[in-house]
Amino acid sequence: MNLLINNQLILILTTVIISLGGLGLLIFGLFRLIRTENITNQRMQDFVNNRDNNVSSKTVYRGLPRELSGPFFNRTVKPFFHRVIDFLSKFNPVDSTVKSAHSLTVAGNPYGMHAQGFYSIRVILLFFAIAVAFFIGYLNGFSNLITILIGASIVFSALLLPKIWLDSITRQRKDELRRNLPDALDMLSVCAAAGLGFDQGLKRICEFWHTALGTEFKHVIQEMDMGVSRADALRNLSTRVEVDEISSFIAIIIQAESIGMSFSEVLASQAKQMRILRQFRAKEIANLMPAKMIIPVALFIFPALLEVIIGPLIPVVLNLFS
């Protein structure tokens, strides 16, 4: 009896969810249709007004053909997901938006993603994980402990995976910036020794280096072209990348500019210091490798050695006790 009641409740709940989803899609379609009709009427009105105002002109008005080129995914599925993301981004909290925007900026805005889109993707992934967990529970029974643990792990993974992915992208970008910094300082030092200024040296790097550091230097140049002072543009770079080596380099450059030191000497000393730091970091990574090798050795190599050494003794011991 209880099982029958539970099945009826699940059926009713599923019907309600599907009905609400269909109602939401219907409302969304009606609003979209009304908006399309308004846009079409406005375009027709503009066309009529322009034609009446330019009766004597020889301009030929032609209707633009509808764009049907390109893959089916780009014309249908992708715009639909963009609309869903725009709709969900309206419910994004302000504090979460600011934090996500800063994290995406540090990561270099992968795939052109913004804070609202990242929040919407997290929400969609969470709803999808809840639906999968509910479906697994419906098939195997909600009273099964293993099923509950599997569903909880799926939902928990959906919550953590976007954050783990963003942290991984951020870590890779910071490592790339650290690796490119000594070479960039060498090039800036050569440019300064050749008579170029600091800004011209940055432009030279942006012309020949299509890397993450070159992109960040390009942002600095664009900010200075817009009227931002050099010190403020460099501070914005330090806030944008959050790399300790770049922050220390920027602090020294700002201090050298304030006291009137030669950029050539400062850049040469900084390039030498950053190269030494890169060597120390490489040695540190190499020294960590033996500790990281303990886990694969214990899991794969050590059991195989035990099997080779002790395996031939097992039949002998069994024969002694038989």
Image: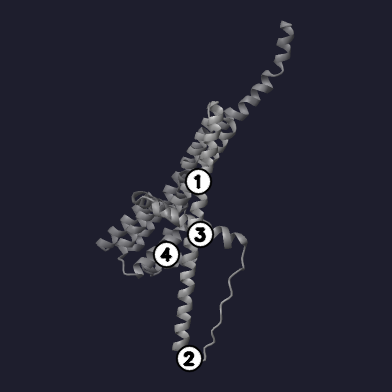
Q: Which mark is residue 29?
A: 3
Q: Secondary structure at mark 1?
A: helix
Looking at the picture, tell me which residue is in the foreground, 47 or 97.
Answer: 47
In the image, is 304 to the left or to the right of 245? right
Cα distance, mark 1 to mark 2?
Answer: 56 Å
Cα distance, mark 3 to mark 4?
Answer: 43 Å
The first of marks 3 and 1 along the sequence is 3
Number of other residues with Cα within 10 Å of mark 3, as a class: few under 14, some 14 to 19, many 20 or more? few
Disc 2 target residue: 55
The first of marks 4 and 1 along the sequence is 1
Of the residues shown, which amino acid type is indicated by label 4? Lys
Disc 1 target residue: 125
Closer to viewer: mark 4 or mark 1: 1
Disc 4 target residue: 218
Looking at the picture, tell me which residue is in the foreground, 236 or 110.
Answer: 110
Cα distance, mark 4 to mark 1?
Answer: 35 Å
